[in-house]
Image (cartoon, grey):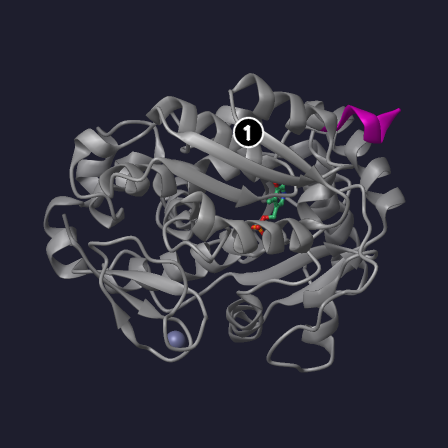
Amino acid sequence: MYFTHLACTACGKEHDGKVPQNVCTACGKPLFAHYDLAAAGRTMTKAALRGRTKSLWRYREVMPVKNDADIVSLGEGFTPLLAAPRLGAKHGMKKLFIKDEAQNPTGSFKARGMTAAVSMAKQFGLQKLAVPSAGNAAGALAAYAARAGMEAYIFMPKDTPRANVIECEQMGAHVTLINGLITDCGAEVAKRKAAEGWFDVSTLKEPYRAEGKKTLGYELAEQLDWQVPDVILYPTGGGTGLIGMWKAFDELEKLGWIGAKRPRMFTVQATGCQPIVRAFQSGEKFAAEHVGAHTKASGLRVPKAIGDFIMLDALRKSGGGAIAVADEDMISSTREVGAAEGVFVAPEGAACYAALKQLLAAGTVRPDDTTILFNTSTGLKYLECYG
Ligand SMILES: *Cc1c(COP(=O)(O)O)cnc(C)c1O
Ligand SMILES: [Zn+2]
């Protein structure tokens, strides 16, 4: 359609989008997809969107897949933006929203990235996909690979929530549990992929998961009637969603659908694994690995992220920030959100609410800000955290 090429986020080198790619061949950093947005905007208009499918594929023109026949879908995206009036009222907030990503297939927003990555893999004729995962990316890859008739090779830390492991097995994936962190799982994939003939779909080491996740930005703008919110709180691991949304806002401005205003973007991490928070606070361009990472919020247990510099740049340019939350505060916040709004959030989603309380207390977020909390998965996948 309107996908033109890939370009490196660090050095700008162009790469061919007609063949499988991982990272930049010159500098090893992530690649971004680029589009002919002027042409895309001729058929994808605000009016045309109103009648389209209630999935992220409604933004078809800014997705990389060439032919519709290659789209591998389970009905992902266009999740509700739930008003949270009772939760907001506790803090004098009238415009607090929960973007409820638990309502995606496989119960997490990893479905967004994997529908795009697996569709592109199908376009390229790939058969064996491998991923290191903290849990939900694995479940999503297992499901989308099964849907496409491909094989999924999955590497997760051995203390990943049980629901993720069972889900992958029941989707027919090849599951290996590793005594270590997601970074160790990634090293295992990197070591074996050439000999095994696997294509690596690690987050941001594959260019299209970010394209699926960028639709979060399109949806927020559309659901707020083409306004961007004032504040976004995003539970950050690899950062694909944060980076994807930042890219989406840029595309939306080029399409002429929003102005120059950007939401203030806040990264939320766990006190036991906060590489981005530390780098943000110390003014670093890149984030050092968080040694000895631990948190119950498995999606946040990412001690080192290849897209660190893109995240840090977005946080700073947006006037946002980075904040860490203790596991106890996530767990107690789950109940507070659930009892007030009827949404059983994952610990990562609860972390956003716990962070909001800190930001309100510090005066960094004001009660009249239109504020988005991301609930990235369902508490039902994390029952062992609530025992
Ligand atoms: C993966 C994951 C995250 C982190 O998402 P990134 O875009 O990789 O930063 C947050 N919450 C949950 C539930 C996840 O599965
Ligand atoms: Zn490069």
Q: Give the residue displayed 36% in from the left and 50% down from the top.
A: 208
Q: Is residue 201 visible?
A: no
Q: Is residue 334 left or right of residue 217?
A: right
Q: Which residues are magenta?
A: 382-387
| SS class, disc 1 | strand
Q: Quadrant of ligand 2?
A: bottom left
Label 1 CA crowd tier, 10 Å (few <14, some 14–19, many 20+): some
Q: Is mark 1 within 8 Å of ligand 1?
A: no
> For residue 234: magenta?
no
Residue 357 location in percent, x, y? 78, 51
Q: Majority secondary structure of the magenta segment?
A: helix
Horizontal and vertical percent position of residue 28: 45, 71
Q: Is residue 240 above or below residue 117?
A: below
Residue that appears at 44% across and 52% down? 194
Residue tagged 1: 174
Splitting the image into 4 quarters, where does residue 83 fall? Answer: top right
Q: Nearer the viewer, residue 66 or 387?
A: 66
Relative horizontal placement of residue 76, taking residue 269 as reference (left or right): left
Measured from the top left, where is residue 36 in percent x and y? Answer: 16, 60
Q: Position of residue 233 (x, y in %)?
A: 62, 53
User: Is 381 above or below relative to 192?
Assistant: above
Q: Quadrant of residue 380?
A: top right
Q: Is residue 228 visible?
A: yes
The three-letter amino acid code for the residue at tag 1 is: His
Q: Quadrant of residue 128?
A: top left
Using the image as rendered, state which of residue 296 and residue 361 is in the foreground: 296
